[in-house]
Amino acid sequence: MSGSFDPSEHPHIRYNPLRDDWVLVSPHRSKRPWQGQVEKAEEAVIPRHDPKNPLCPGATRPNGKVNPNYEGTYVFTNDFQAILEETPKPEPSDDPLFQTAQAQGTCKVMCFHPWSDITLPLMELKDIRKVVDTWAEINADLGKTYTWVQIFENRGSAMGCSNPHPHCQVWSSSFLPNELAAKERTQRVYKEKHGKPLLVDYLDKELKKQERLVLETAHWVWLVPYWAVWPYETMLLPRRHVLRIEDLTDEERNDLALMLKKLLTKYDNLFETSCPYSMGWHGAPTGEWLKKDCSHWQLHALYYPPLLRSATVKKFMVGYEMLAQPQRDLTAEQAADKLKKLPDQHYKEKKG
C-alpha cells in the first residue's frame, strides 16, 4: 500500500503501557455499510420502590435479613460472596503446572440511592457526593485488612446486571488480582526509568496534545486512552498525583461528583439509552502495601461500555480478540470526538 500512514484510515497496533500489551486498531472497517446505524432501545418502566427488590429500603433479602429504610447510600455484605473471610489454606504443590494459593476476602454491595428508578447521572450532586464519600470510606476501611479493594459497577443487563436498582460492588482480597499485578509492575518500572509516575506523565502529555480529551473540570480530566480497547472506553484521572480515593480533598470530591454527572450524561446521550458499562477504580494497593512506597501509582477510574453502533448493537470480544489480541474498529481520537460533541443535558431531562 503506497502513501503515508494515516491512523484514521490504516490498520495499526497501539501499545498499552499499563498492561504491557497491544491492541489492533482497524479504522478502515468503519466504512462498512451498517456503521452509524442508531436504534433506540425500549427502556422498561422501573418502579421507584418495589418491596420484592432485595436492594430496596425495607426489603427482605434472600438470606432473610431486612434492609433498613436507608435514605442515602447503604452498604451490606453480599449474600452470595465470591471470596470468603475464612477459608482453609491449600496444601503446597511441588508441581509448577498445578499451583493453588489461599484466597481470602469479603464482598460488599453498595446501594447509591433509595430509589430504584434513578441512575447516577440523574441524581443530585449532593447525592453523588455521598457515593464518592462512601467509596472512599469503604476503600480505607477494607484496605486496613486486605491487599486489594476493587470498587466496580456493572450497569445494565448487557453487562450482566440483573437488578436495576442503582448500586455497585466492592470485592476485597488477600491477593493482588492479575490486572493490578500487571499495573504494579509497569508503573513501578516506568517511574524507575523515567522518574515520574506513568499516568501523571501520560496526563501531562494528553493535556498538551488535546486529541483524546472529552471533558475537563477544575480537578479532573476525562479522556479516551490512546490504547483503548472497547469502542467508547474512557479513563478518568485527577489532575493532582493521588494514590487512593480516600486521599481526595473535599474540593476534589465535590468536583468528582460534578464530573461523574457530566460524563455519565454524555454516555447516556450517546445512543439515548441508559448506557450499559462496567467501571472500576484503580489506585495503589492497600493492606501491607500501606507501609510501602507506592508513589508510582496514580488513582484512576475506567469505563468500559460495550455499545458499538446503537443502543442494541454491542461489541463482543470473541474470535480474534480471545485467541490473538484485542481489536477495535474506530480510533481513540474518533471516539473522543464523538463523545465530546454530545449534549451536556441528559436526554431524559430534555424530553421532560
Image (cartoon, rainbow, N blue to C red):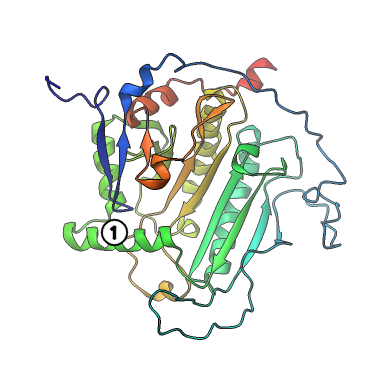
Rendering coords of residue 119 (x, y %): 66, 36
Number of residue marks: 1
Rendering coords of residue 163 (x, y %): 72, 44
Look at the picture and state if 135 lies above or below 92: above
Q: Which residue occupies 62% across, 79% down?
A: 87
Decide which of 93, 191 is in the foreground and name it. Answer: 93
Quadrant housing residue 261: top right
The quadrant in which the N terminus is found is top left
Rendering coords of residue 25 (x, y %): 31, 33
Look at the picture and state if 127 lies above or below 267: below
Q: Which residue occupies 86% across, 55% down?
A: 60
Three-letter code for the amino acid on which mark 1 is drawn: Thr
Q: Is residue 219 visible?
A: no
Look at the picture and state if 220 lies above or below 307: below
Q: Is residue 8 left or right of residue 334?
A: left
Residue where numbered disc 1 is placed: 186
Q: Is residue 289 visible?
A: yes
Quadrant housing residue 225: top left
The quadrant in which the C terminus is found is top right
Q: Is residue 4 left or right of residue 60?
A: left
Q: Secondary structure at mark 1?
A: helix
Decide which of 180, 351 is in the foreground and name it. Answer: 180
Number of other residues with Cα within 10 Å of mark 1, as a class: few under 14, some 14 to 19, many 20 or more: some
